[in-house]
Amino acid sequence: MAKPTYSDINNKTIFLIQAKKLNDNNLIPAQDYGYEVINAIEYDEWYNRKTRYGYTLYDGFDMEGSGHRFLQEYLNTQYIPVGSVEYVEEYIRQCYRIQSVIPLNVPLQLYKYVNRFATIIGNEEFENKLIPDRKYFIKSATKIKGYSDFIIPKKAKDIPHDTYFVSEIIDIETEWRCFVKDGELLDIRCYSGNPFVMPDIYTIKKMIKEYTDCPPAYTLDVCKTSDGITSIVECHNFFSCGLYGFSDYKNYLIMLIRAFRWQVTKGKK
């Protein structure tokens, strides 16, 4: 496991980047956004003519293992973990004693932009509250990257006991990720479907304006259906988020820092 890249790390924010080891034992970031952190640090040092951030590559997290412990020297508020959802969640559990990170899914303030049947119910309510022979998409409302599937309620068996965000199926033509900081739309990137069909930017900005109970940095996923309607898919606090080409180095690091600190502050409450 690599030590911090910069020797003088006092009073600096250090990004603890999830890494994997190559055959020659060199470490590389495990995800593309880990590379982007390094690039953004180098850009910030070039732009500001001083070193304000540091990073270390950490290969001690076993995705397939259990009972992993981060090294104690890294479990302090100087570090911002950057890696998979599992990596960041485990860091939050060990460093901040916060047991779970609740997904944002579709915030209540934005339900008017769902434009389809959607609800949050327990799996024991599927048959009573959903049309028995209609197909739905379900996703855990309590766990990031928790159980998700397409179901037909009358045939849904062996669904893990949980509370779920349930959505009817709609004909989606394209899906885009919107990157938001302090209520400002910084960029949008296509991540699924037709990249030449744009969502309605005016509708996206309305969503952002009305979503006031939000993290300081987050992603807003939207879709455009075959009938031309722009709708919300879900939101994510800005950690473990795929970038799909987003590379705003002036904002990227502070977005990661503020989103992470918002998450742990929210968890403590």
Image (tube, rainbow, N blue to C red):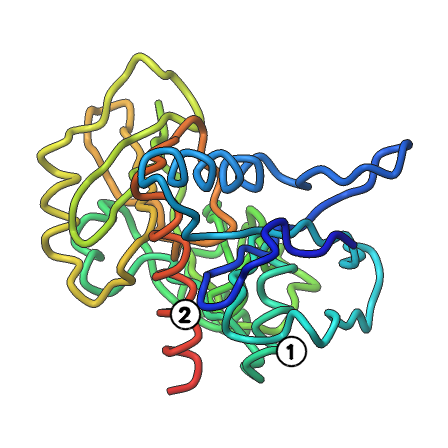
User: Is label 1 in a helix, a strand or a loop?
Assistant: helix
Q: Quadrant of residue 29?
A: top right
Picture residue at 55% right of the left edge, 59% below the top: 8
Q: Which residue is mark 2?
A: 263
Residue 32 coordinates in the image, percent (x, y): 58, 34
The quadrant holding residue 155 is bottom right
The circle drawn on residue 121 is none
Image point (48%, 48%), residue name: 137
Does the image show residue 154?
A: no
Could you say where residue 180 lies in the image, as x and y percent from the top left?
25, 46
Secondary element under disc 2, as helix, strand or loop, is helix
Packing grade of label 2 (10 A; few <14, some 14-19, many >=20) is some
Q: Is residue 6 above or below residue 267?
A: above
Point out residue 52 in the picture as x, y percentages from the top left corner. 41, 52
Query: Where residue 94 is drawn, which disc sits there?
Result: 1
Query: Can the viewer see residue 205 in this picture?
Result: yes
Please give the name of the residue rendered at 24% of the width and 21% of the height, measured from the top-left corner.
Answer: 198
Q: Position of residue 224 (x, y in %)?
A: 27, 29
Precedes in sequence: disc 2 or disc 1:
1
Mark 1, residues whose alpha carbon is within 10 Å: few (<14), some, or many (≥20)? Answer: some
Q: Amino acid at mark 2?
A: Gln
Residue 260 as seen in the image, left or right of residue 72: left
Is there CB contact under 8 Å for labels 2 and 1? Answer: no
